[in-house]
Amino acid sequence: MIGIATQEAVVRSWGDRHCQSPALPALVCVLGFTETALIPGISAAGQTPSDRRRTALADGEFLLRGIQPHYHYPLPPLTAGASPALISRALIEALALPLYVFDAGLPLPPLPEMIHLGGTPARCLTTGQAMTAQTVVHLWEQGWFWGAKLSSEYPWLIVAECVVGGTTTALALCESLGIAARDCVGSSHRQSNHEQKWQLVQQGLAHLPAEADPFTCVAAIGDPMQVVVAAMLLRASQTCGVLLAGGSQMMAVYALARAIAQERQLPWHPAQIVVGTTRWLIQDRTAQIQRLAERARCPLLYTQLDFSLSRHPALRAYEQGFVKEGVGAGGCAIAAHLLAGWSNSEMVNIIDRLGDRYHASGGSLIAN
């Protein structure tokens, strides 16, 4: 049920330490926004710019509240497939995972249950002025505080994200840190839109000064989630294990955290940190996730969750290359295997049952 893409020894050692742990990890999901998401065609996580402004809030609401008669931010319809929030929520419920959802910088008001970190949405990365230096420092301090707090309460953390357009800021951040990532990052599109991403990233990178430090890089072309999770990761990994749940976005965060640790001479504990994603992203022939992990020197594992026999067409769409990952879906599935040893059919049944309830409540998984 779990595959290993890179650094097998590190991943196996990490997994052995957390396999069937008697104490549950916490799932931490950091929501953010970049105005890069408003560019036509940049993301399939919402059909319109208005949808994409709400996607992170909708996913966060579904993680927190599950099936409800009414939603403040309903899940936006997708061209095909279902929000990965359904996967994560089903497994959160089944495992009874403690859950924390953070607002690192959103364009609309968060829900009361979300922890507001005092950040702001990032401007488009093409400006080279995505965030102010003050915002970056503030978000860093918030991430460090919560990394210390959560690592003192849980044996390990699953850290997830939702940032529409975030694979484009991930590409920019990797390139700014000296990691060649062109044509490697994933996409919510069935066919990755590499050329569009690259043209935007080049515009943003043109504003960077020579020999820019990591904080300058992320302020220029990054997004608020990246800063928070990098700080949280560095602080938490001093005392507990961390599973960064995601794809290329979390590889960029891993690289940012390591660069900041080197630049500021902070403790770096690579044996404590892995990135966990999905088989759909690993097998995406229009991306090169494993190559990116190798270039970022990042340990990568993945769930082999397979929806071929799901009774929901919107979930079977994952097998045709739609959606692929998000909101910690891969990390939750990895946790389910480590903690409960569930088979693929058991996990699919759990997720299908939530899909049944969602349909029964009047929810729609795909566009009309």
Image (cartoon, rainbow, N blue to C red):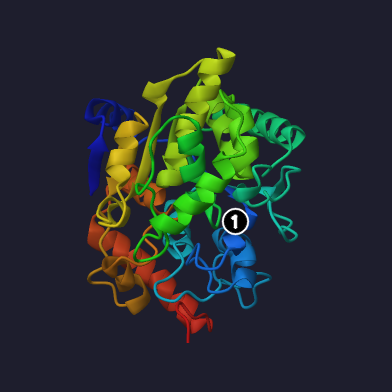
Q: Residue drawn at (53%, 84%), measured in percent from left and top? A: 362
Q: Residue drawn at (40%, 23%), measured in percent from left and top? A: 270
Instruction: Give the labeled residue for mark 1.
Output: 36
Q: Which sits in the foreground, 50 or 74?
A: 50
Residue 200 percent location from the top left of the image:
53, 52
**Number of other residues with Cα within 10 Å of mark 1, as a class: few under 14, some 14 to 19, many 20 or more:** many
* Badge count: 1
Residue 63 located left or right of residue 319: right
Is residue 99 visible from the viewing direction of this image? no
Q: Quadrant of residue 317?
A: bottom left
Residue 304 percent location from the top left of the image:
25, 53
Q: Is residue 241 above or below residue 130?
A: above
Residue 193 percent location from the top left of the image:
40, 60
Residue 82 located left or right of residue 106: left
Is residue 290 visible from the viewing direction of this image? yes
Q: Is residue 235 above or below residue 322?
A: above
**Which secondary structure lies at badge 1?**
helix
Q: Residue drawn at (40%, 75%), measured in percent from left and top? A: 80
